[in-house]
Image: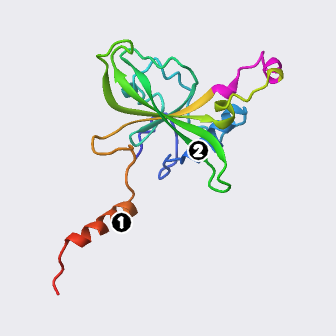
Amino acid sequence: MGDNNNVNLPPGFRFYPTDEELVVHFLHRKAALLPCHPDVIPDLDLYPYDPWELDGRALGEGKQWYYYSRRTQNRVTENGYWKATGMEEPVMTSSSNKSVGIKKFFVFHLGDEDTTSAIKTNWIMQEYCLSDYASSSTSRSSKRKSQSKTDYSKWVICRVYERNGDDDDGTELSCLDEVFLSLDDLDEISLPN
């Protein structure tokens, strides 16, 4: 069962969205000021919180937390900072293979970002932004029109999780994945003739 302390999902429902679903069905709707049903992902200013403080503040499912945040360069918390890994992946639609967003990866470090004594942790953040925002394709006329409104194009969705030492990407294997991986071991087993 998930850790959904702040969301009323019916029994049996789990929140395990794909990258495409996060960008198209949640982030795009948030940026366009459209309602999102179900409205389960909270707005959260990430940067005052250390990753282990997200439980109860962000949408938690399993050992992953999801939330909307304003895009910012300041990723410093009280006890550390989020450092970009330099890895970026396009988020593609499954139907037309069109890029709809960008996923950036960050690792949490304990300590001051201005010193060399910071300690790298196993906390990972995937930050999703819209492709339009990433390419900075907003025109000046649209900026003038929306000066009185909040600029929702700077919203991002973050997925935070603590990576296990033996798990490189922080995701769990499905039962089918485990079966296929175990088939590789059959070559090493000698069956009686």
Front one among 18 and 2? 18
| Residue type highlighted by circle 1 | Phe
The residue that label 1 is drawn on is: 180
**Membership of 153 in magenta stretch:** yes
Taking the image as shown, residue 47 lies to the left or right of residue 98, namely left
- Using the image, determine if residue 110 lies above or below residue 7: above
Which quadrant of the figure contains the C terminus?
bottom left
Question: Residue 1 in the image: x percent, y percent?
Answer: 40, 47
Q: Label 1: few (<14), some or many (≥20) within 10 Å?
A: few
Q: Specify start and end residues of the magenta stretch as a single range.
A: 142-154
Q: CA distance from mark 2 to mark 1?
A: 26 Å
Q: Earlier in the sequence, mark 2 or mark 1?
A: 2
Kindly tell me whether residue 38 is visible in this rendering. no
Write the residue at 67% across / 33% down.
30
Question: Residue 192 in the image: x percent, y percent?
Answer: 15, 83
Kindly tell me whether residue 9 is visible in this rendering. yes
| Residue type highlighted by circle 2 | Val
Question: Residue 93 in the image: x percent, y percent?
Answer: 63, 50
Give the colour scheme shown.
Answer: rainbow
Element type at marker 1? helix
Residue 115 location, quadrant: top left
Write the residue at 55% across / 30% down.
42
Q: Label 2: few (<14), some or many (≥20) within 10 Å?
A: many
The residue that label 2 is drawn on is: 91
Write the residue at 64% across / 53% down.
97
Write the residue at 39% across / 44% down.
169
Question: Residue 133 in the image: x percent, y percent?
Answer: 67, 30
- Using the image, determine if residue 136 lies above or below residue 73: below
Callouts 2 and 1 close, C-beta under 8 Å? no
Residue 110 location, quadrant: top left
